[in-house]
Image (tube, grey):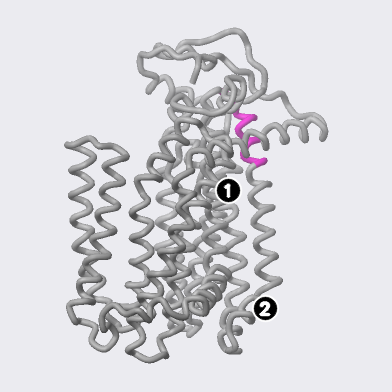
Amino acid sequence: MSSTSGSAWDHSNNGGGGSPELREALLLGDGGSSPESREIKGIAVKKQDDLEEIRSVGELMRLAAEENRRLWYLAGPAIFTSLAQYSLGAVTQVFAGHLTTLELDAHHMLGIYLQRSWVILTAMSVILLPIYLFATPILRFFHQDDEIAVLAGRFSLYMIPQLFAYALNFPIQKFLQAQSKVMAMAAVSAAVLLFHVALTWLLLVPLRMGLVGLAVALNVSWWLVVLGQLAYIVMGYCPGAWNGFDWLAFTDLLSFARLSLGSAIMICLDTNLFGWQIMVFFGFNAAISVRVSNELGAGRPRAARLAIAVVLVSSVAIGVAFFAAVLLLRDVYGAPFTGSPEVVHAVASLGVVFAFSLLLNSVQPVLSGVAVGAGWQWLVAYINLGCYYCVGIPVGYAIAFPLGRGVQGMWGGMLTGVGLQTAILVAITARTNWNKEASEAHARIQHWGGTAKLAVDDPI
């Protein structure tokens, strides 16, 4: 699916890191500027010359290197932030995943396993605390905009209670799932969701608490989920599995943690590689949407085309690396974590379709970012709707059930939808008249310009 971002023009004028020269280069490129300025509805905008026609390989390499620097300046912090945030949740979830491997053990031990999980995951949350406490200096180290780093760091502090709620919630979910108590989970989640919507509206709209209100709403809602599910357990709805708190929860923690780590690594290999890879390309998505919108707004269609070419080369190179790694390791990466040949074979059988998923998803988010930067959001929304829901899901269902291919069939069908979406976006991008897009972007700036004066070389 495409990632939605706000107006890159507005974003650029509201913040940016580094020196004024670098910020101006990010906004308008390095193609040379004229001292002439133009005023658009009260906004003084320095006129920029587009790139000259590229006449040699050396010139192409020089321009590509400059564009690559701008790309990573924008994408680097975004990728790191997405990876860090995704990894926090992923690590917590995969450490909770050990309960699924213990379902064959004694029924009365489930409560002990639940409590051991709480001990281990609470300790894990304490280990993760420095990332929350020092988020601002970490983001500054990666050259994130100072104002964004401060706000993100402040929000991270507010979100510490949610981290510990995660440590309790995921083991509780596995505990209830192991006993097929899924309706209780659904009821608690539905009730909390309704409460969360009302609380978020109250804190953000009438009370105008901003980020603080958002954090409070999330913390309260997650803890209500934990307390609601825990109340269901301790009130006697899990007889035999829950016999109260027990000191046995603090015994044999090392071997329990070792089992958890094995499960975590296996799940990471099967699932989280895809998630972490997607985080990388969402960073590219954000960066190219900014670059395209700014170059088109500055009347530089050739520079926009160069930015698209550079980001596609970078993203495809990373996608090919993921693709090759999965294909090379598909027959062996399950073996260290299970003695079951059937499980190893099942994991390996998904390797090819998984590898192609990674490869296609190295291109699709980037092209969606191009579409966002060019203002094609509605077009891409219709493409997504058609490819996923009219092609991907029906094809996946047909292969999975009537043809009996199971998970491979369902995944293959969704891969068909992603492939079709990618092909359509490639065709649209290749056939686009970028000179016309630059003119339309100029017209949008005139239409939305407002009345305030702002020159691009003023402090941002």
Q: Please, is residue 446 above or below residue 177 in the view?
A: above
The residue lying at 59 percent from left, 22 percent from top is 19
Say which residue label 2 marks: 332
Q: Quadrant of residue 153?
A: top left
Q: Nearer the viewer, residue 212 or 72?
A: 212
Q: Earlier in the sequence, mark 1 or mark 2?
A: 2
Q: Please, is residue 233 above or below residue 15 in the view?
A: below
The residue lying at 51 percent from left, 56 percent from top is 421
Image location (x, y in percent) of residue 391: 45, 65
Q: Quadrant of residue 113?
A: bottom left
Magenta residues (range):
299-310
Say which residue label 1 marks: 427
Three-letter amino acid code at the position of disc 1 = Ala
Identify the image quadrant of the N terminus.
Answer: bottom left
Membership of 433 in magenta stretch: no
Q: Is residue 196 visible?
A: yes
The residues tagged by marks 1 and 2 sit, at their Cα atoms, a distance apart of 38 Å
